Amino acid sequence: MLSKIKITKVGTFSFLIICLPHAQASLDLLAGVEAGIETDTAMTNPDLDRTQEILTAQQTDKSHHWYNDQTGIAYKIDIKRSYTYGNYPCLAYNLTIIKGNQESVKPLDACRHRSGKWISVSPNPMTF
């Protein structure tokens, strides 16, 4: 259960901060989570791990795709560009979600937190 949700604005970026009880203290709003939050396309932990690995590799010359046998959902990540915001390395990328005959492409941004994890960010506070 969430104990606190907060949106913090830093410059032109907005960060969604989720505070969790100690037993679940982890970075749950990792890159990719917002793509399926509260829907039937939500990423599982293995999907989130895969997203983290792909963003860490930062390969812009190829598409990265995988299929989750448990959920029946296919994902594809295409990194568009890298940039920095302050001292944080960031990436702009497209996440394609394919479930059945439905395909959705979401343009996303993520910055690398000091913990080493990629955290979803939005250059437009109205997207939250």
Image (cartoon, rainbow, N blue to C red):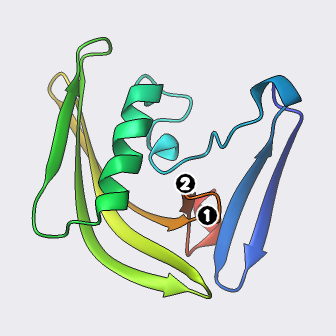
- Residue 66 image point, x, y percent: 19, 34
Is residue 45 depicted above or below 31 in this figure?
A: above
Q: Which mark is residue 117?
A: 2
Residue drawn at 76 percent across, 27 percent down: 24
Total count of labels: 2
Q: Nearer the viewer, residue 123 or 18?
A: 18
Position of the N terminus, as image quadrant, is top right
Q: Quadrant of residue 76?
A: top left
Q: Nearer the viewer, residue 101 or 95?
A: 95
Q: Quadrant of residue 62?
A: bottom left
Tell me if mark 2 has few (under 14), some (14-19) or many (20+) residues whose alpha carbon lies within 10 angstroms of its own. Answer: some
Q: Where residue 71 appears, x then y in whole percent? A: 32, 15
User: In the structure shown, which secondary structural element does the residue marked by tag 2 occupy?
Assistant: loop
Instruction: Check contact, mark 2 vs mark 1: CB within 8 A.
Output: yes
Q: Amino acid at mark 1?
A: His
Q: Is residue 41 visible?
A: no
Task: Using the image, determine if residue 32 lies above or below residue 16.
Answer: above
Name above or below for residue 71 compared with residue 36: above
Residue flagged by tag 2: what amino acid is it?
Answer: Lys
Residue at the outermost left position: 62
- From the viewer's perspective, is 61 left or right of 45? left
The percent coordinates of residue 97 (x first, y second) are 27, 39
The residue at the point 70 percent across, 86 percent down is: 11
Does residue 60 appear anywhere in the picture? yes
Gap between marks 2 and 1 measured at Cα: 5 Å
Asked which quadrant contains residue 16, the reply is bottom right
Quadrant of image for the C terminus: bottom right
The residue that mark 1 highlights is 113
Instruction: Identify the residue at horizontal 69%, vertical 64% (top origin).
Output: 15
